[in-house]
Amino acid sequence: MPPILLFGIHFILIFFFCFWIWKKQDVELRPYFWPALLLKLGAGILLGLIYKYYYSIGDTFGFFDDACKLSALFWSEPGAYFTFLVTGDESDLVSLLLINTQSRSLFFVKIVSMVGIIAGDNYWVASLYFSLISFLAAFLLFQKVSFMFPGSRLAASIGFLFFPSVVFWSSGIIKESLALAGLLILAHVYVTLITNSKPFWWEWMLAFISVFIVWNLKYYWAAVFIPVACTTLLVHVITQRTKLKWSNKILIWIASFLVFCFGVTLVHPNFYLENFLQVLVDNYNEFIRISPQGIVVHYQLEPSWWSVILNSPFALLTGIFRPFVWEASTFLQLAVAIENLIILILFISTFIRLFSQAKSQHRLLIFSVAAYVVILCLFLSLSTPNLGTLARYKVGFQPFLIFIVFADNFIVDWLKVKLNFKGKL
């Protein structure tokens, strides 16, 4: 079948499937659906084109090439294919001539191969499906936040559906597209629970699948999100039964969080207490070694908690606001820098309203989101000093950061008045 015809058939199938989902949406949310979907699908195609013609090399095509080798095994030996999905030992890797043998990459290749079988081993068709999965997860969280917090609908739409970097780096055939989809589904269930609602059975099922996917693709995202979410839910339950001062809530939160974090140190070798700091420094040194070009940040980083504390302010500044506009030397860097400038301006204006947020009935939720953003940003920044790579990796916390700085922001409110926007956001 000609590739363009194959692409057209799958695009039509996706359209009718999405039309069925769109019909089920609340009337007020429908206007967001199609623009966000088309933006996400287009971003996945654009990502492939940029990697093909701008970067020339990229793991997206390496993943797909390996996936095609697995799909070929499916058509020739279905039993061997399904056995490999479950086991996949080193002898199999050698015989299949797979390039991506690292465990997380291999896990992703297996998933890509399953999509590739459906997509007829067409990269661009498979890209549509990965972008679709990412979009559906983002829209699910947007729908939940819009329902629970109607006044934050604009912030949710920008953070989860329309912010350019988030859309681009969570589309197409890259690990972040699937990992972020899983993370947003977990966030959906978390918001459901903390607003005293009960998730449906299918939401629990998606949550368990999401934990499995996020842990196997981006275990450090899960290692921050799950303790933060569990801690906040525990404190939420405790404070519903007993009246506590806000300061006492924070103390309970910190103590509980440390206990959950200790549990995390037992489930992955990189998190073992005797390994964690050295792994952090080793990752930093490796990125410095392989990053002769681009914008690289140099820390005086040593495997000690004191060193992490000393470098934390600069690392947070770097992870959230850099590259600055004057640091950009390419079009892509400039685009990211302009986004960062917008975030900086909105961050400052949000910080001004910090005391009013402290009195919000949802301050525990706001605190937990901020804690997740700060913790993940800190360790990603320290371990990934190449700002080009960091721009991709920080998609794990950026949607939530965008949501925080856009929500209840007086600059955003002022712009809505100036633009005479009458729509319900």
Image (cartoon, helix red, strand yellow):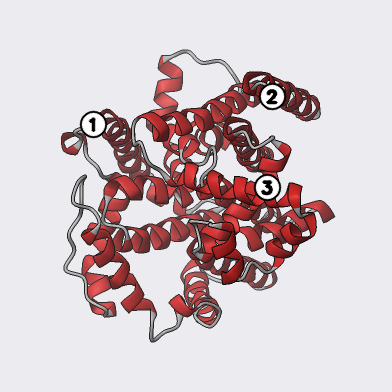
Q: Position of residue 384 (x, y in %)?
A: 31, 58
- The answer to whether residue 131 is above or below residue 34 is below
- Corner quadrant of residue 35: top right
For numbered disc 1, what is the local secondary structure? loop
* Closest to the observer, 375 or 416: 375
- The answer to whether residue 382 is above or below residue 145 is below
Numbered mark located on residue 71 in the image = 3
Of the image marks 1 and 3, the number of the one nearer the N terminus? 3
Residue beneath disc 1: 330
* Closest to the observer, 142 or 354: 142
Residue at figure coordinates x 49%, y 80% from the top left: 265
Q: Position of residue 313 (x, y in %)?
A: 24, 60
- The reply to whether residue 146 is visible in this rendering is no
Q: Quick check: 286 left or right of 184?
A: left
Q: Nearer the viewer, mark 3 or mark 2?
A: 3
Residue beneath disc 2: 6
* Closest to the observer, 139 or 41: 41
Numbered mark located on residue 183 in the image = none
Q: Residue type at mark 2?
A: Leu
For numbered disc 3, what is the local secondary structure? helix
On-image quarter of the N terminus: top right
Residue at figure coordinates x 81%, y 29% from the top left: 24
Q: Are marks 1 and 2 in contact (CB under 8 Å)?
A: no
